Image (tube, rainbow, N blue to C red):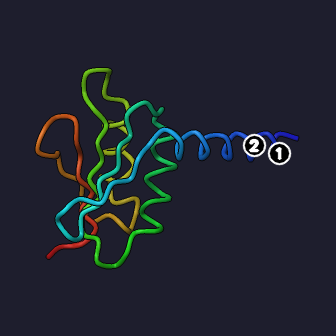
Amino acid sequence: MEEKQALFRLAEILERSIKGAREVKEAAPGIISLDLHGLYADEAKALIDKTLSKAAKSTYILRLIHGYHRGDSIRRMIFLEYGQGLDRRVIRVRGGSNPGTTDLILREL
């Protein structure tokens, strides 16, 4: 029963994540921008993982737009989950061009 509830919760998180976030390809080739505004940290992680799985081999940066006025839980989760070398798809994590963005470096040019 607990397993069924966990699966239902995961499906619910993914559904909310897909509805709440927008994936935007930027003009620069090889960069995907992902808007995470309005998501909880676990929802953002599920969406980031899904995007990493679907990213083309030509993608070298996944730019995460999380904002900074309403706390930093998503930013902290990004650095903890992807900045420690725990995910082989991510080489390193760097702060973006403003405090509301973080870049996941998937490969070096």
**Depicted 22 relative to depicted 40: above or below:** below
**Depicted 44 relative to depicted 38: above or below:** below
> Residue at 30% of width from left, 60% of height from top?
25
Residue 88 % position (x, y): 38, 68
Amino acid residing under circle 2: Phe
Mark sitting on residue 8: 2
- Please report contact status of discs 1 and 2: CB closer than 8 Å, yes or no: yes
Residue 66 % position (x, y): 31, 37
Dot 1: element: helix
Q: How many angstroms separate mark 1 from mark 2 (CA)?
A: 6 Å
Please give left or right for residue 99 compared with residue 80 in the image: left
Q: How many marks?
A: 2
Where is residue 2, by image quadrant? top right
Residue 92 % position (x, y): 24, 60
Circle 1 sits on which residue?
4
Please give left or right for residue 19 compared with residue 96 in the image: right
Q: Crowdedness of circle 2 by 10 Å Cα count: few (<14), some, many (20+)?
A: few
Q: Residue furthest left?
A: 97
Residue 59 % position (x, y): 29, 71
Dot 2: element: helix
Amino acid residing under circle 1: Lys
**Depicted 80 relative to depicted 53: above or below:** above
Q: Crowdedness of circle 1 by 10 Å Cα count: few (<14), some, many (20+)?
A: few
